[in-house]
Amino acid sequence: MNPLRPVILAAARSPRVEQVVTRAPVSRDIVRRFVAGSTRAELLPVVRGLLATGRCVSVDFLGEDTTDRAQADATVAEYCALIDELATSIDDPVDSAPAGAPVRLEVSVKLSALGQALPVDGASIATDNAGQICVRAAAAGVWVTVDMEDHTTTDATLAAVTALRPDFPWLGAVLQAYLRRTEQDCRDLAGPGSRIRLCKGAYREPVAVAYHDRAEIDDSYRRCLEILFSGSGYPMVATHDPVLISEVTARKVREGGPANGYEHQMLFGIQEREQGRLIGQGIPVRVYVPYGDRWFSYFMRRIAERPANMAFFLRSLRSR
Ligand code: FDA
C-alpha cells in the first residue's frame, strides 16, 4: 500500500489543509479530472456524453460530514432537483431499456451529507432525508445507492438501508472489502432483489477492523464477490483493478454470471479505456460522476489511491 496513503487520508479530514488546497489556483484543472463540474449545468453535458457511449451513470452531489441541519436540508433539495433534471433533460428515456437491463440513471448519496453526524437524532434525520430522495427517485425512475463511509458509520448506514428497502426495494448499498466484517455483511445482504456495490474501501481505518495489506484486501474482495455472485441479488463490481476485473469476466464466461445480472462500476476519470472495452463485450458499466463545490475530501481520497496522482498533484503545486 502507498506509504503516504494514511497521511493523505488524515489530511482529507483537516479543515486547515482543505483551506490551503481549495484556495490554491492549482486545484481547478486537477480536480476536473475526477469531478464533472461545480453545478448541475456543468454536470449534465458530461452525463449526456457518458450515456451516449453506452455507459450508465451514478451521480454524486459532493459533500459529507455535515454538522448543520440547514445544509443537510439543502443537500436533499439539490438531490431532488438533480433527479428531476436527470430524468427530464436527458434524451435517454428511462423506460426504453430492454427488460432486465439496469436502470441507466442512478444517484449516490452519503448519509453524512444528509445529517447522520448531527448531534441530535442524526441517524433518523439522515434516514428520513434519504427516504425523501428515494420518493423523488421512484417517481422519476432513477435508482439510488447509499455510499459507505468510515467504519464508525457502517451499522447506522446499513440500518438506514434496511429501514428504507421495504418501500424502495431497488435501494442499493455499498460494502467495503477492506473491512473484516464485510464477508458476513455480504452473506446477510445477498438476498433477493438486493443491489450491493462492492468496493475495496477508501478511508483510513484501524487494523483492528480493516485489512491493510493489499493482497489481503484483494482476497477479501474475491471472497465477498463470490458470496454476492452466488446470491440472488444484483452485484455491482466497483473496482478499477484489472486483475479482479479479468477474474470476473473469466467467471462469467465459465459460469454465466448471476441470474439477475451484474454490472461493473468505475469512478469518473479513471480507466476509461477499460470501461469502453467492457461495454464492447456487452457488459454494463456504470460511471460514478461527482459534481459540486465540496470536492476536497473526495479529491484527496482519489489522490491517496495512487502514488502517481500524488506526484502529479505536488508537481502542479510547485509549478504555480
Ligand atoms: P486499487 O486501489 O487496487 O487500484 C487498482 C488500479 O486502478 C490502480 O493500479 C490504478 O491503475 C487504478 N486506480 C485506482 N484508483 C485510482 C485513482 N484514484 N486514480 C487513477 N487510477 C486509479 N469507497 C468507499 O469507501 N465507499 C464508497 O461508497 C465508495 N464508492 C465507490 C463507488 C464506485 C463506483 C467506485 C469505483 C469506487 C468507490 N469507492 C468507495 C472507492 C473504492 O473503495 C476504492 O478506494 C477505489 O475504487 C480504488 O480501489 P480499486 O478497487 O480501484 O483498486
Image (spheres, rainbow, N blue to C red):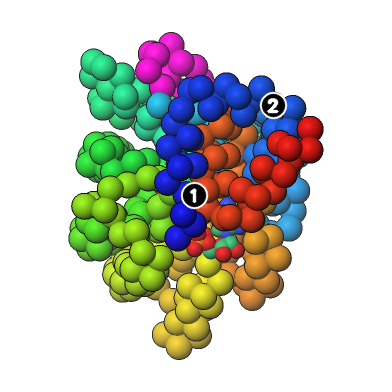
Q: Are marks 1 and 2 in contact (CB under 8 Å)?
A: no
**Magenta-colored span:** 66-79
The residue under the point 70% across, 65% down is 273
Q: Quadrant of the N terminus?
A: bottom left
Which of pointers 1 and 2 lies earlier in the amino acid sequence?
1
Amino acid type for the residue under numbered disc 1: Leu
Amino acid type for the residue under numbered disc 2: Ala
The residue under the point 64% across, 75% down is 281
Q: From this viewpoint, is residue 13 visible?
A: yes
Q: Give the x, y percent position of residue 163.
A: 24, 38
Task: Indicate yes or no whether the magenta region holds residue 68.
Answer: yes
Q: Residues within 10 Å of mark 1 (few under 14, many from 20)?
A: few
Q: Is residue 183 left or right of residue 37?
A: left
Q: Residues within 10 Å of mark 2 (few under 14, many from 20)?
A: few
Q: Give the x, y percent position of residue 169.
A: 34, 47
Select label 1 or label 2 by which is in front.
Answer: 1
Total numbered labels placed on residues in the image: 2
Quote the CA–CA distance across marks 1 and 2. Answer: 21 Å
Q: Is residue 243 left or right of residue 217?
A: right
Q: Which residue is mark 2?
A: 24
Q: From this viewpoint, is residue 191 visible?
A: no
Residue 315: quarter of image: top right
Q: Which residue is mark 1?
A: 4
Q: Main secondary structure of the magenta part?
A: helix
The residue under the point 23% across, 19% down is 121
Q: Give the x, y percent position of residue 61.
A: 55, 32
Q: Is residue 269 left or right of residue 123?
A: right
Q: Secondary structure at mark 1?
A: loop
Q: Nearer the viewer, residue 192 or 310?
A: 310
